[in-house]
Image (cartoon, grey):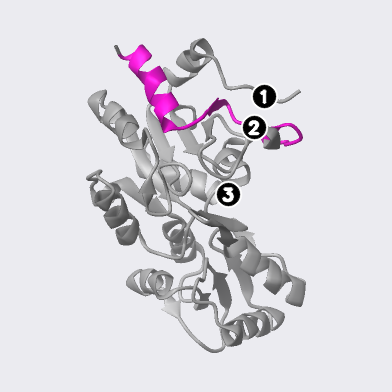
Amino acid sequence: MGRTIDTKETSIDILKGVKCFILDLDGTVYLGDKILDGSIKFLEELEKNNIAFKFFTNNSSKNAEVYINRIKKMGYNLSDDKMLISNFVIINYLKENMPNKKVFVLGTEYLKADFRAANINVVTEDADVVVVGFDTSLVYENVSKACEYIRNGATFLGVNPDFNCPTEDGFIPDCGSICSMITASTGVVPEYFGKPSHHTLKYVIENTGFKEEEIAFVGDRLYTDIAISNGNDSVSILVLSGEAKMEDLVDSEIQPTLIFNSLGGVKDVLEEIYK
């Protein structure tokens, strides 16, 4: 028998201890170019009660500025420091662990620009490291180059493990799917960043200053948004407004702490706590 939507009593007990919400975007706050019902009221409830929150997206096809502007256009005004992205996590790792390495980036111009702005040595030939992102401008010649460098010994890193990106019209292939094609050709599996990697958990803790048990990761995808809480003390909240459905939980090893239909449901519980 599968999970059910959690009772208000259970949710109150757990959410009382949350001091910082880390919110996914696609399928959680919005879908495509449409804000999801209840999202803005949820954010207003957090602000009203001085509860910290940040947005975190695995979507490496754009940069933080694009997502900030998208949310502003949907009716919620946010400051630049509220937006975290998988691009930042892998850049931070490279700067700390692989300084001065030559990096070939298979990704959009947005991703490459983030790397160059961070003074990563981005190259088109003779790479030490191959970084693959959600490349919506994918060119076959560049895929072939990435495979060549990896066969020659370059380290293979994936910005985010998502296989699909939700849109208003369905799903489109994401970074994980592109990496799977390269793995099929080279036999090499990448190390992934973004959610649910320990790299992202570490980055979030350092960025927010909160402890694991004070943080709640909120999202619509089991193997990224929810799985990041596996093996640690953070809370995971699944919203059913995007990819995951209740039936997906029946046979899944990944189980959320709490389940809501949408962010609006989380807002209702917070109103009970802070009334």
Location of residue 118 (image quadrant): bottom left
Residue 131 is inside the magenta segment: no
Foreground label between 3 and 2: 2
Q: Is residue 213 left or right of residue 130?
A: left
Which labelled disc corresponds to residue 246? 2
Amino acid type indicated by mark 2: Met
Query: Upstream in the sequence, badge 3 or badge 1?
Result: 1
The residue to which callout 1 is attached is 3
Task: Give whichever of discs 1 and 2 has the lower sequence position.
Answer: 1
Residue 230, position as x, y percentages in the image? 62, 36
Residue highlighted by disc 3: 197
**Residue 193 seen:** no
268 drawn magenta: yes
Classify mark 2: helix, strand or loop: helix
Residue 220 position by quadrant: top right
Provide the residue span drawn in magenta: 249-274
Front position in the image: 80 or 25: 25
Quarter of the image with the N terminus in it: top right
- Quadrant location of residue 147? bottom right
